Image (cartoon, rainbow, N blue to C red):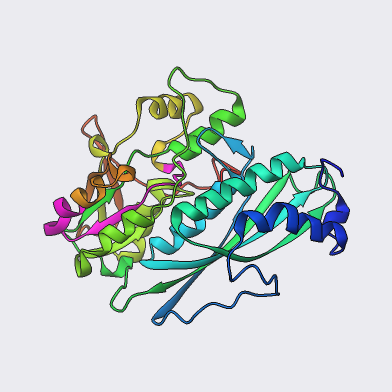
């Protein structure tokens, strides 16, 4: 028995059966997956369905605080959660490069299974393909998720109003900087560690605010800057952020300076940005801080009636600058 994945493991024959039986099914076994049919049959949950899909191409596969397996599951769960949906099930498809050690594949599958258990969401179906060497960068993972939206839940930039408060659930820029520092071989006295985690509990807590919760988003590619710019454009409002209030660790600030990056534009994988009615800001902050994942949550800005609608940052120096989406991809292959 080889220790490496072969092209034959993707051919649909006996090797494929062994790959699934020995490496995949034992980690994700559940009643919807176990029949190994071409699709999973789910109970009708009632309410509106929310569906999302994602692909994870991060390099390296392992980085401080996480790996591609954990990232793939958390990213899809978070996309559903910030929509206000309760995740019901995930799919997981693997594109494996020939020659990947089974030990590495098992490590990523274990991480994905652990993240799914942490989020309380089963992986109910999937697919496996094997590609020739130098065609797949070791491992690529594609995921999809389905969730259910409760009646009355409608989160959108169009619901944002002047006077609303902007919150973030914790320190920014940790994921993107952790991946880049690992990729570049940079070491810091205080390690930069990815924040990759499911934010489902945080979203569920904020949903108890009802109509006072206007909007949620996980600030992945484009970071806080991308979310603020989207809010201004799609909501036709002003977004005023306070640089002094935005939580960031000294290690991340130093890493961003060393790499020449704006922390506001760096991806996060275990944080959320929320907009709530101004009167509910302190309650929302308390809800976030009551969870270990939200202990560093902060109110970082407000929505204004500025014309034209722009996102602006009040800097620590006392000035102002416009917050824009990154023009391109400053941090490739970070998720």
Q: Is residue 59 above or below residue 276?
A: above
Total numbered labels: 0
Q: In the depicted view, which residue is nearer to us: 190 or 208?
A: 208
**Residue at image point 70% right, 75% down:** 38
Judging depth in this view, the residue of 121 and 209 nearest the camera is: 121
What residue is shown at x 87% (from left), y 44% (from top)?
1
Give x and y (percent) for residue 301: 23, 48
Q: Is residue 15 visible?
A: yes
Read off the magenta span. Answer: 265-284
Q: Is residue 108 magenta?
A: no
Residue 14 image point, x, y percent: 87, 61
Q: Quick check: 125 left or right of 237?
A: right
Q: Residue at x 87, y 63 (%)?
A: 13
Residue 279 lies in the magenta-colored region = yes
* Whole-percent x, y for residue 37 in the image: 70, 74
Q: Residue at x 20, y 54 (%)?
A: 284
Q: Position of residue 2 (x, y in %)?
A: 86, 43
Q: Is residue 25 left or right of residue 67?
A: right
Using residue 283 as the reference point, say whether residue 271 is left or right of it. Answer: right
Residue 237: tell me if it is visible: no
């Amino acid at each position: 028995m080889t220790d490496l994945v072969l092209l034959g493991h993707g051919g649909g024959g006996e090797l494929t059966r062994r790959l699934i039986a020995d490496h995949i099914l034992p980690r994700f076994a559940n009643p919807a997956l176990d029949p190994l049919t071409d699709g999973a049959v789910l109970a009708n949950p009632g309410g509106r369905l929310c569906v999302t899909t994602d692909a994870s191409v991060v390099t390296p596969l392992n980085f401080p605080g996480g790996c591609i397996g954990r990232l793939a599951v958390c990213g899809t769960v978070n996309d559903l959660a910030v929509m206000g949906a309760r995740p019901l099930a995930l799919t997981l498809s693997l594109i494996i490069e020939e020659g990947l050690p089974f030990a590495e594949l098992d490590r990523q599958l274990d991480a994905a299974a652990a993240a799914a258990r942490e989020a309380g969401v089963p992986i109910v179906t999937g697919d496996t393909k094997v590609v020739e060497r130098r065609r797949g960068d070791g491992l690529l993972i594609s995921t999809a998720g389905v969730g259910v939206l409760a009646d009355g839940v409608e989160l959108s930039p169009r619901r944002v109003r002047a006077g609303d408060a902007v919150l973030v659930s914790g320190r920014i820029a940790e994921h993107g900087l952790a991946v880049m520092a690992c990729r570049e071989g940079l070491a810091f006295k205080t390690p930069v560690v990815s924040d990759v985690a499911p934010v489902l509990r945080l979203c569920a807590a904020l949903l108890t605010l009802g109509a006072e919760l206007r909007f949620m988003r996980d600030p992945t590619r484009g970071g806080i800057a991308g979310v603020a710019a989207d809010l201004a454009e799609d909501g036709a409002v002003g977004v005023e952020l306070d640089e002094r209030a935005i939580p960031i660790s000294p290690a991340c600030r130093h890493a961003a300076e060393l790499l020449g990056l704006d922390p506001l534009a760096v991806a996060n994988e275990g944080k959320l940005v929320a907009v709530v009615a101004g009167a509910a800001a302190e309650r929302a902050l308390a809800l976030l801080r009551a969870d270990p994942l939200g202990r560093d949550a902060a109110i970082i800005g407000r929505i204004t009636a500025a014309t034209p609608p722009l996102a602006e940052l009040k800097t620590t120096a006392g000035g102002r600058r416009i917050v824009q989406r990154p023009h391109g991809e400053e941090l490739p292959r970070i998720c």
